[in-house]
Amino acid sequence: MASRREQAAEALKAYDEKRDFSKTAEPSSSSKTNVPPALHFLVQKHDATRLHYDFRLAWNGVLLSWAVTRGPSLDPSEKRLAVRTEDHPLSYGTFEGTIPKGEYGGGTVMLWDRGAFAPLADFDEGLAEGKLKFELFGDRMAGGWTLVKMKGKPSEKRENWLLIKERDGHAVDDDGEGIIKRNTLSVKTGRTIAQIAKGEEAQELPEKGKAARRVLPAQKTGRSRRADGKLPPYREPQLATLVDDAPEGEDWLHETKYDGYRCIAAIGGGAVKLWTRNGKDWTERYKAVPDALAALPCKSALIDGEIVSLHAGAGSAFSALQSDLEAGAPVRLQAFDLLELDGDDLTGLPLIERKEKLEALIGAAPESVALGYSQHIAGNGPAVFKAIAEAGGEGIISKKADAKYRSGRNRNFLKVKAEKRQEFVIGGWSESDKKGRAFSSLLLGVFDGDDLVYRGRVGSGFDEETMAQLESAMKPLARKTMAFEAVPRAMKRGAHWVTPKLVAEVKFAELTDDGHIRHGVFLGLRKDKPADAVVDEKSASAGEASIDEVAKMETPTSSKAKPTKSTGGKVAGIAITSSKRVIFDDAKWTKRDVAEWAEAAGERLFELAGRRPLSLVRCPGGVRGGKACFFQKHYEGSFPPGIGAVKVEESDGDSADYLMVEAQQGFVAAAQMGTIEFHPWIAAADKLDKPDRIIFDLDPDEGLGWGDVKSAACDLRDLLADLGIETVPVVTGGKGIHVTARLRRIADYDTVTLFAQTLAAYLGDSQPKRFTANMRKAKRGGRIFVDWLRNQRGATAASPYSLRARKGGPLAMPATWDELDTLKAANTFDLSNGYERLDAPCPLIDGTDLQSIGKPQVEGLEKLMSG
């Protein structure tokens, strides 16, 4: 079968044969200059033997062309004759000038309109059957249009069609030639047809002409309930957790999984903004969507959805979307959630109510191919998924019908893929032995911190155009050495290396046991995702996290001495990848050092931070300048053995799965994932509402010294001792001290929090020059903030024996009060001296009895406050 390029060349033979390019300035079919994007349309006013308007649609590498004798009309009752002419090259789309008399089509040509177009039905099929329906997004022509082929006599050589305006928001009854009479200047140069004929210079375009690409005016927002009248700000989207099986139950809504770019869309203040999932402003890239959103009948709105291709057919293929975006063609926003409407925050409403409001909003707007509503099916998840998969779809998204909207990844929002897909980073390419083929395959990997881990190659999914684009993109990234941590020897032969900047989306059958791609197919380059964010993606079951299996594991007993470095690459039975990678540059501690500390201190960490909800501070790239660390508290279904989940009811009434270390080796597993810090709750999972410790975090203002902090800690110790509570100091690895007491699990959170708040307020009132209970830094004024907030339900604090993501890799470490007096700083301990602490009893575990906050403590505090 001939390639698209060959088919286009054949179709343009008639065009070239009719012209003498030594005499006319028109471009030949081989011209590559000033080629407009694909899926565009244009209209050229042509003052030839008879004035007419040439209407052209870019399709399959050529401009399909019709001569409209009277020009287009916005009146749907006006059916304008459009005579099919020879196909023109794409480069003709920018042509404006005079064709010499005596040449084919001699006369003056003006670029009268231009813009994007979107097919509303299968275009090739419509062309064969003689009926084309499409939407235009031009400077002058907009909305729905139809070209219908008229039945002619067998002897007739020319094809007569009718150009008809569809009845929509852009139609104007009884307008006749109005659009022609109102628009007499070129959209390219601002000249009249006479000025072009005379060869006069281009004119300053009117403001309307400069606003090309926006057909619909922005919706007048009027006075919104938002006091500032501005656009709703960007909101981090809710993300789906990858699972293997579709959930069952009638309380799940199932939608098609679209193959595109996530989009957060804001309308308000007379403007529209379209953000990617990471908050990048891509408004200008998504042609036609802003106009469709501006027409929504609301004052302001914030919508969550997916940008998809208009003409990809089943599955809204990602590769087709990329082609559309590269070509500047119109795309579609498939909306599936409404986060804000007219200033009201809807994220607290159940999903089903938000979707009802969204459907009503879109349904009340003028119909547009650039905006759609994502329908759903309630219940029957497995059957829905099977039907979608059998139809060739990518998969489904399953959402809890009663769930509130929560940014970040959670298990109320699941994705089930019909085929495995993942992003990989291009690290090189292998040579091809086929003539004319730029390469044989791409060499791919994923990042583990700074290391690029080889994940195999992909050698299919490329057509000529894709190969040319990839070759062009990889050429400036060429390098002599490979960026991969390691590559099989056979793959090095004939390999060419590139700097790992390009991200490829690949579908594949599976990953082999050694983690390599099997039966991979290239789908396209992703330009919305940075290469260093591409890591391994794993799936879990759709049911509850497998805590039972973790609980059955035998908890290993860790050594209290620094372990001997193993030669097998494992710590506590867990493989540590990139083990030599330096985590703390200034201290030269490696990833293996971090994992070995987690093993050695595991018994104490498990005692103080295990079997309770906790947050992780993960630093995949290490604790170095420019490397990002992030908190993670929700269980996302992709964690190794030893790390499980506990269901927690949050303040909004929803339940969520929080991370929990279920077995001692989970701390080593977390280190393998790039975890530096552990921040547990002050309550264990089996009694979440009964805290087993109380923490006063002494946080000094800038300018205060370590001696000031130690003195404050001792005074607080004495105050609590007078109330019958014995405490232990924990130096935080930063600048402060956690004055901590372990509690019997009797008092609830309200009691413990109120006690801590009242005592902090007492210190602030009784010694206002030294202490404050106000967390605002601006209010500290050379004082120590007594942070009582660590004792609220859901709050966390850095665990004793946890590393801190700070310069030098310090440890949070409990001490005795006598030791505190000798310590020179809160960051005294690190991996060079921390192991010595494991040989001695732990002051927090072994040094004090469990305390109580009961009637004597409360009454004693009340006396202090009243005295």
Image: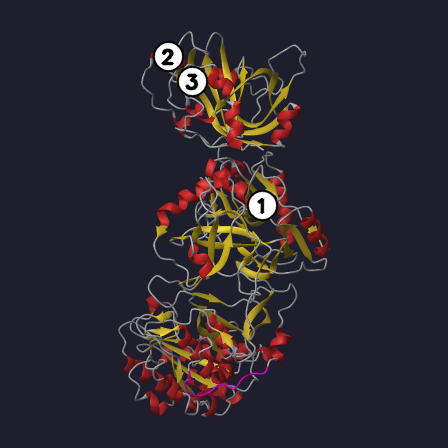
Q: Which residue is mark 3?
A: 110
Q: Which residue is mark 1?
A: 335
Q: Evaluate whether residue 139 shows in this view.
A: no
**What's the distance in space between the residues labelled 3 and 1, CA to CA?**
39 Å
- In the image: residue 19, left or right of residue 637: left
Asked whether 437 or 861 is in front, the reply is: 437
Picture layout, residue 153 above or below residue 427: above
Which is more N-terminal, label 3 or label 2?
3
**What's the distance in space between the residues labelled 2 and 1, CA to CA?**
48 Å
Give the amino acid type for the residue marked by disc 1 in the picture: Ala
Which is more N-terminal, label 1 or label 2?
2
Task: Label 2, secondary structure: give it.
Answer: helix
Residue 544, image x, y percentages: 64, 68
Q: Which residues are magenta?
A: 554-564
Task: Label 1, secondary structure: give it.
Answer: strand
Mark 3, residues whose alpha carbon is within 10 Å: few (<14), some, or many (≥20)? many
Give the amino acid type for the residue marked by disc 2 in the picture: Ala
Q: Quadrant location of the C terminus?
A: bottom left
**What's the magenta bit mostly, secondary-structure-wise?**
loop
